[in-house]
Image (cartoon, rainbow, N blue to C red):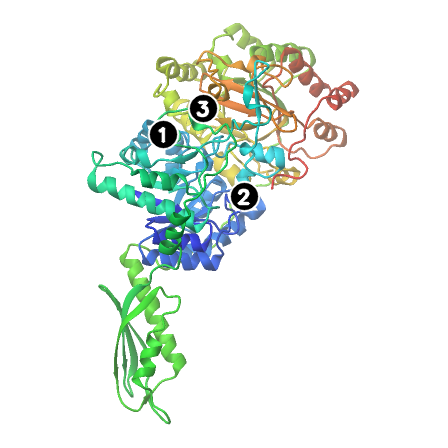
Amino acid sequence: METELLAPAGTYECLEAAINAGADAVYAGTERFSARAYAGNLTVEEFISGIRQAHLRGVSVYLTLNTLINTTEYEEAYNTVKPLYESGLDGIIIQDTGLIEMLRTCFPELKLHASTQMSIMNTYGARLMREQGFSRIVPARELTLPEIRHIKDDTGLEIECFIHGAMCYSYSGLCLMSSMIGGRSGNRGRCAGTCRLPFDVLCDGHDMDGARGKGSSYPLSMKDMCTLDIIPQLIDAGIDSFKIEGRMKSPEYVAGVTGMYRKYIDKYLEHGRENYHISDKDRNRISSLYIRTDISSGYYTGEKGRQLITLDSPGYNGNDESFVTGIRDKYVHSCEKISAEISAYIHEGEPAVITATSGFNAVSVTGNTAEPARKAPLLASDIESRLKKTGESGFICSDTDIDMSDNVFMTVSALNDLRRQAYDELADRIIEDKGYAPHRIAEACITPDISVNHSGIQALDISISTLDQLKAMLDTVESTGSIGRLYIGYDIAASNVIDNDMYRRISSVIPEIYISMPVIMRDRIIRGNGTDDKEEAHALYGILDALVNDNPYINGILAHTYDEIGYAVSHMPGKGIVTDTHIYAFNTHAAGYLASIPGFKGFTCPYELNKKGLYELKTGFESSLVIYGYIPMMITAGCIRKTYGECLGSQHRDISICGPDSGYVMLRDRKGIRFPVVCDCRICTNIIYNERPLCLYDQVKREKTEDKDRLADRYRIDLTIEDREKSADIIRHFLKSNEDADAFFSDMPTTTGHMKRGAI
């Protein structure tokens, strides 16, 4: 396909401004299920009108239904899509895999686009989406151009990438910071932008901000993206759709940015790279159009660290008011109407015929038989004035031709109805001629047949991240009780510190051993493309393949992203796959989708579900619930150490000495709360954890003593930054559930997360 310029439409006015400024497509949300719940969004009536006006001008329209939905919202999601699909909606951008079967079955002509909220980062995740019927993916914004080119060449999928606007510090879809701190979930479209707040950075116990002063640093605030300078590279990388961020921005912003990128995309396509340059005037204008103080080209060129961050207060540049006024006058108004000619044939005793023509398109509509006038006959001037009224049709009448007999009559309402029909059918003809479907019929809503009960399994599992935690777990379990499944962190397993004797010892007390895959899996890591340690990065996955496939003690893997599911299906056949919290089984339909994957053993419930949502997930498929552990609030390609010039290199992972009361990397917010940061340098990734761990000890104990229904089949203890002693205490007290355990957990600062209220 040709390069598509895709503009945001937070309101109907923005939609029209985008079309006027030269967008090839627009994306918009309705009042429900949009990842920008606080944008104006479009009513159903506005959306239907917008589709028609866009299609008349050769512009595609995509619906953003890119939030997670509850089981009880499934039918409402269907009802949201149905009228838009029947009006010709071109595509739908989704995050929730629970929608896939319904969308494919009920709306078969609708193109499916995988949202950036799905965090697709490599060819394996992209292939998985292709197999599910997706025609396009919006990959993670953190990918480099070689990674994008590789996905394009490998899968043939359309690739849509952000090219301008605000950027998130975390991988989209993997961020729970706003949710955990303020209860407003980005996965439900209500992100509060917590990353834009000030944080002090403490590294090795020292305040890294120095002279900047306490509370005056913004280490998580990304510079806005502006890629005008690298448009040639973006096009040559195989990106099909250039996406502008900004569904909460003004029509002037939408039109100004769209118009600027339209100009320079066309310039490159027409004149090539040698004659491509950005004028100083345009550079200044785009930099001052509702954009943050500093800009960057994002991660595309492989840059990371300080050059992508606005450490100082992330304010906005002043606008060039004359430029904004010019934009408003030129673009911010109703779409320019399409010229049409209309003629009428009205003769006594014959059916009335009205013909509408625009360019090479023409339609004729036939009405009732004209009658002889009993009183005042129709006048040509009356007919002409009626025919010139085009209303909201999108046309302007440029010429009329009236062929009528004397003393003829037809009612004004009949003439108006015939005129409206003519313009409607002409619009349909033009829309069809441009390759769009003006009208379609949706299939009835389907409800997958999913049994609502637990699998009957009852087990306690443990996940460990360090060798000390593994030793603490073994010492405790061997003396106090049994564990159903052990998840071993990938780097511990790959470092050969666990020998066969240790595996034999583990398997003697634990029935199943799984490897927890790296939390992020990029093609640059798999293939060693784009890293400083190519051979080591490539070797890591060879080691994991051999470890999982050749080690008789390993039963399967814990997958954190769709990329890892695809990788495991391809490279680890016959091994079990358990999905972790960030592969969102937010509803029974999503759980059913995961169960269809070869090797699927079970899913882990998302952190953002409350009790009600968890009870709704009694699907008959094996479910796990984390009952203890520090919740990962952000998983990032940005590295806080690197931002402050403290990169450790690929041999380091400071998890073993990082804790809420220790040194190393910490974020301290305005209230003095400290958030531990794990720098996994082997895969160049940061994980920012919540200040205190999730703990559902009281819930678990209540179930044991009162015979309550379990919230899940398996419960899991996640050990991340705990030392050996702390790890042993936590495991021992969960296993005992006695008065000593009651006192232990009551004295520990913990949170129950979203268990009571749930995320909004």
Residue at image x 52%, y 47%?
Answer: 33
State which quadrant residue 86 falls in.
Answer: bottom left
Q: Residues within 10 Å of mark 1 (few under 14, many from 20)?
A: many
State the CA–CA distance, disc 2 to disc 1. 31 Å
Locate residue 318, reporting x and y percent. 45, 41
Describe the element under mark 3 as helix, strand or loop. Answer: helix
Three-letter amino acid code of the residue under disc 3: Arg
Going from N to C along the chain, the mark reached first, 2 or 3, is 2
Q: Residues within 10 Å of mark 3 (few under 14, many from 20)?
A: some
Three-letter amino acid code of the residue under disc 1: Tyr
The circle drawn on residue 69 is: 2
Residue at the outermost bottom position: 374
State how many labels appear. 3
Going from N to C along the chain, the mark reached first, 1 or 3, is 1
- Quadrant occupied by the N terminus: top left
Between circles 2 and 1, the one closer to the viewer is 1
The circle drawn on residue 300 is: 1
Locate residue 570, reporting x and y percent. 38, 26
Describe the element under mark 2 as helix, strand or loop. Answer: loop
Residue 509, compared with residue 589, is above or below; it is above
- For the residue pair 396 and 687, the one nearer the viewer reads as 396
Residue at image x 53%, y 39%?
Answer: 187
Locate residue 611, reporting x and y percent. 66, 37
Between circles 2 and 3, the one closer to the viewer is 3
State the CA–CA distance, disc 2 to disc 3. 36 Å
Q: Is residue 86 left or right of residue 457?
A: left
The circle drawn on residue 306 is: 3
Between circles 1 and 3, the one closer to the viewer is 3
